[in-house]
Amino acid sequence: MKADQGRLALVGIMDRLATGDEAALGDLYERTSAKLFGVCLRILNDREEAEDVLQDVYLTIWRRADRFDAGRASPITWLATIARNRSIDRLRQIGRRGGERPVDEADAVADDGPDAFEMLAGSEDGVRLAECLRTLDERTHKSIVAAFYGGITYETLAERLSVPLGTIKSRIRRGLIKLKGCLSQ
Amino acid sequence: MSDLRSEEGDEADLAGEHAIGLLQGAERRAAERRIERDAIFAADVDAWNQRLAPLYDAIDPVEPPPGIWPRIAEELGRMRRLGRVDRPAATPKGRRVSGIWQWIGLSGMGLAAASLAALILVTANLGAVVDAGRQDAILAGTLANDQGEPLFTVVFYHEEGHDIATLIPVARQDDGGRVPELWLVPPGGAAPRSLGVLHASQPILLDIADRAVGMPDTALAISLEPPGGSPTGLPTGPVVAHGALNTL
């Protein structure tokens, strides 16, 4: 219920943004900046870079607000996706290859540890995603999750896991097909 | 060997790969461009973003330092002021800032903080050029940088169903080996589209028919890019100067 209200409020703010209402950007910042800063920090793992990117993120949101379609995306997902993509762009721009964390860091979410899938248990969609990720073999779902959180490319994954690029691509591509199928059931 | 065989058998879900962030360099940029022009692909990417969305739940919010919002507000104000200079007679409808200014607000490459030395802009209601009954209109203007130095003279006219833009470089500026690239900036904050790389020292004629130039509030921008044009498919420099087009 609370989540629904939050979503509705965000949709309302996005509507105002799309008409060029500058005050709406302030309202949006108030409601979402901590979440989006968390996303930037997670990808960049560098406070100063994350602060810089966060500024870009809100200006991007301002510019693109009229493209937000509430029928196609939830507002927080749309916003978080912009934050993550901007962070990944910055990561690639500054020449780091993603998170500087080992792939096993993905364990925090992908492993069977109690905290891991519990984080996804907060929503119906999260539970389903967790279940479907579990249908993949462990190394594949770990790689997918590590890439998501770390902004890690195929090349870097292959290097860190010491497997040929073709192998990692093939593995993840099969994983994506399976994941998509599982989630559409 | 088995790896190679299996790779061939696995069809890439480019939308999913892009949504996760697995692509890099040219592949990533190609995917981003495709989102702009291929609605089905864009919807596929959206669908993947939605599938992966629960992963964001596992990211803890972190309060950003208090200095960030004032910087955003300042940048927003700057975009608005500049936007007004360029559109004195425009009736605000929907967005108050014209497409180019919104686009510059993108700042995805750190434009906001970058030096204001790389982009020359002209905004004009180019729709006026192709309005019925005004097919013989010729629009001309001079694009100057912040110091008032003229850099390009622009002439627009309509001839036998074509919209022709002539861009004549007036002064050679020190652009550090970069080349001018002309962009069409659609209204509503959509991403600019390249109309081609210009010549820094020779006049150039561009046929811009079928380029949707006739839409109201469409703007043109010139950015300075690495030789061969923008590596990202989008302008990579901020705005410094502008010039309105006037009917001759």
Image (cartoon, rainbow, N blue to C red):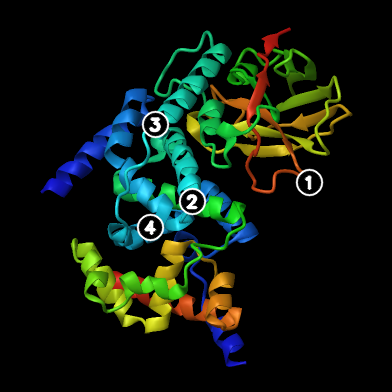
Which residue occupies the foreground of this view, B217 or B164?
Answer: B217
SS of the residue at dot 3? helix
Q: Mark 4 points at which residue?
A: B49
Q: Is mark 4 on a helix, strand or loop?
A: helix
Point out the image quarter for the C terminus of chain B. top right
Residue denoted by label 1: B228
Q: Badge 4 sits on which subunit?
A: B
Mark pair 4, 3: CA separation = 27 Å
The percent coordinates of residue A178 (x first, y second) are 37, 77
Q: Residue B211 at what x, y percent from top left?
A: 64, 34
Do the numbered discs 4 and 2 sit on residues whose CB atoms are within 8 Å? no
Q: Which residue is drawn at 51% across and 51% down?
A: B35
Mark 3 neighbour density, 10 Å: few (under 14) some (14–19) many (20 or more): some
Is label 2 in a helix, a strand or a loop? Answer: helix
Q: Distance between the residues labelled 4 and 2?
A: 15 Å
Badge 2 density bin: few <14, some 14–19, many ≥20, Cα 10 Å:
many
Which residue is the site of mark 2?
A87
Asked if the residues shown at circle 4 and circle 1 are in contact, with their CB atoms under 8 angstroms apart, the answer is no
In the rendered image, which residue does mark 3 sit on? Answer: B69
Q: Residue furthest bottom?
A: B2
